[in-house]
Amino acid sequence: MSTILDKLLRNLGLMRVSQVTKQLDFGHSIDKRLDEHRELVLTLIEDTDLLANQPWKISHLATQDDYLLRIFHMVYGYYPEQAVQNRKTHNVRPRPTVLGKCSLPEFKQFSLNSQ
C-alpha cells in the first residue's frame, strides 16, 4: 500500500516527511553540521580577519545558519534551543552573536532568544 502511495506522491512531486528527513540527514547529522558551521564562524572571528569590515560575508554566514536551523527543525521537529524542554540532547553550540538573531519567521514565533 505504501509503495502505491509513494508512487502517487512522487508523480505529484511530493514525498513523505520521513523520506525527506532521511535524505537530509546523510553523512554527518544535521546537528553536527550546524555545530560545525557555528564553530567555523567562531574560528573565523577569533583567529582571522577574514570577516573584518565584510558585512556581506557575515550576512551570508547568518543566512546559512538560518538555513541549517530550518533543516534541523525539519529533521527533529524542534530547534536546538528547545532541546532541553523536549528532553533531547544535541551538542549544538549557541548561535554566535556576530550573526545576529535568527531571521526565520517560524523561529520567531517560538520566542526563542538566539545567542
Image (cartoon, grey):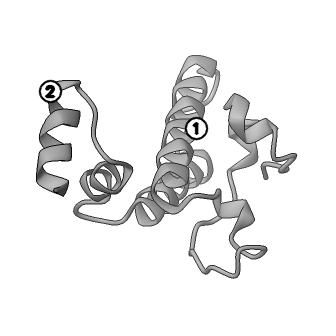
Decide which of 13, 7 is in the foreground and name it.
7
CB-based contact (under 8 Å), mark 1 and mark 2: no
Describe residue 49's horizontal placement relative to residue 84 as left or right: left
Mark nearest the camera among 1 and 2 is 2
Give the image location of residue 38, x and y in percent.
55, 54
46 w.r.t. 83: above or below: above
Decide which of 88, 5 is in the foreground and name it.
5
Quick check: can you spot residue 95? yes
Real-space CA distance between mark 1 and mark 2, rounded to the nearest whole angstrom: 30 Å
The residue that mark 2 highlights is 11
Count of number-bearing discs: 2
Q: Residues within 10 Å of mark 2 (few under 14, many from 20)?
A: few
72 w.r.t. 97: above or below: below
* Amino acid type at mark 2: Asn
Give the image location of residue 45, x and y in percent.
61, 46
The residue that mark 1 highlights is 66
* Amino acid type at mark 1: Asp
69 w.r.t. 9: above or below: below
Return the residue found at the far front: 1
Residue at point 54%, 42% (across, down)? 70
Decide which of 97, 79 is in the foreground and name it.
79
Give the image location of residue 5, x and y in percent.
20, 45
96 w.r.t. 50: above or below: below
Helix, strand, or loop for circle 2? helix
Instruction: Tell me the quadrant of the picture where the N terminus can be found.
Output: bottom left
